[in-house]
Image: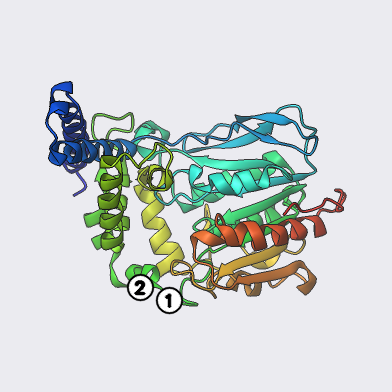
Amino acid sequence: MKYMVTYDLMETVRNTNQWLGASAKALASYPAFAMLPNPTVQWMAAWGDVTERSFERMVAKPDWGIHSFTCDDGKDHLVSVETVVERPFGDLIHFAVQGRPAASRRVLLVAPMSGHYATLLRSTVVSLLPDCEVYVTDWKNARDIPVSCGKFDVEDYTLYLVDFMRYLGPETHVIAVCQPAPLTLAATAYLAEQDPAAQPRSLTLIGGPIDPDATPTDVTDFGRRVTMGQLEKTMIQQVGFKYKGVGRKVYPGLLQLASFISMNMETHSRAFTDQIQRVALGEASDHDKHNRFYDEYLAVMDMPAEFYLSTVERIFKGREIADNAFTVEGSPVDLGKITSVAVKTVEGSKDDISAPGQCVAALALCTGLPPEKKASHLEEGAGHYGIFAGRSWRNNIRPLVLDFIDANSGGQDAANTTAA
């Protein structure tokens, strides 16, 4: 499956379904059909509308959609997204609030590179903006990166984070969400040994697989069941001629999406059937609950093959982070070298992706860190998404994270109030 023809075949299927949806919508919308009181015509138009939008989303990067918010002065302030560090595989972006004095809390939000864009953290960013200067790792779609830019594996990812932390300086507070947690911990340890003056003040790890075997899930079981050869043969393809990354080996976003949907096929099928019915009855809207969710969920990106394969091999199978045996460019990265960066872990009791126990394992690995610099929180009743973007995050976890940041802000003003 690693050849371009397979990649192009998937894109052809997607494009064809988008065209079929657009055609059905256009045909059923002819004025002449309005004279025929047949619900089949309305259903056809609704099916076309939902189908076109669904398949069109799959190749479009969602917009952040954060344009303004009301500050403490009672005025609406515009928000602009600025690229402050530009790299081939990912940029460091800043959400600049126009007309507001710089917030004392500087936060680097490390987004996952796991099939979806960084915009998956939109609500997390919105919740932090009133109290923080927010920077986010904005990873790029591998299909759009020319082969001439070279490889990108877990070591390259770690060095990107090192560069971003160096750019932001030592007064930074890092929050890593899910997949990047192990590599963010490694990047912090790398700085602790190589460039101590550039270390962040604190590190918050949310629902990440520091030790995947601490509490096995379907995700970790899958990593154990398959061999690396099987993964490369069944998951890796080459980008077709339609995109700038032609020839680059990737784990295609469309293939990832198929896996996501297959895990809850009945739920997704019901959701789309219900949406078609709502469109036919005129009860749907452009930004209703269904569209808000699936506009993000269906927007997938290709992952560099070497990053995906090295993540499975080194983080899940080899447990290099869990065993403190990770290396970057041949040099060992000792997590015990972290001695001054405060570390907090956050887990959800109902997280079925990174189950409780996997993330908190980070604290035991930081053998050089005094107990007063370690903290953990288990959110009862929260699933994976809820611990960084849902009600649990907004009402319970976010205030705790801001308190943790303030308690470890050094020379910064620790008297900031945490908005509810």
Q: Is residue 331 visible?
A: no
The residue indicated by pointer 1 is 216
Which residue is at the front of the view, 368 or 380? 380
- Looking at the image, residue 417 sits to the left or right of residue 57; the answer is right
| Disc 2: CA contacts within 10 A as few (<14), some (14-19) or many (>=20) | some
Q: SS at mark 1?
A: loop
The residue closer to the viewer here, 96 or 230, is 96
Spatial distance from mark 1 to mark 2, Cα to Cα?
A: 7 Å
Q: Which residue is situated farthest in the top direction here? A: 31
Q: Nearer the viewer, residue 342 or 390?
A: 390
Residue 88: give x, y in percent of width and height: 47, 34
Image-based side of 319 in relation to 373, left or right: left
Residue occupying image coordinates x 77% and y 31%: 100
Q: Is residue 373 left or right of residue 235?
A: right
Neighbour class for label 1 at 10 Å: few (<14), some, many (≥20)?
some
Q: Which residue is mark 2?
A: 221
Query: Residue 416: x, y in percent?
Result: 83, 50
Report the amino acid beneath label 1: Pro
x, y percent for residue 294: 37, 46
**Amino acid type at mark 2:** Asp
| Image disc number at residue 184 | none
**Quadrant in which residue 286 is drawn:** top left
Quadrant including the C terminus: bottom right
Q: Can you say whether 363 is above or below 277 in the image? A: below
Q: Residue at x 25, y 41 (%)?
A: 280
Q: Earlier in the sequence, mark 1 or mark 2?
A: 1
Give the SS element for disc 2.
Answer: helix
- Which residue appears at 26% of the width and 47% of the height? 277
Is residue 28 positioned above or below 263 on the image?
above
Q: Let me know if residue 35 appears in the view.
A: yes
Q: Position of residue 16 (x, y in %)?
A: 16, 35
Q: Do the residues bearing badges 1 and 2 touch, measured as CB atoms within 8 Å? A: yes
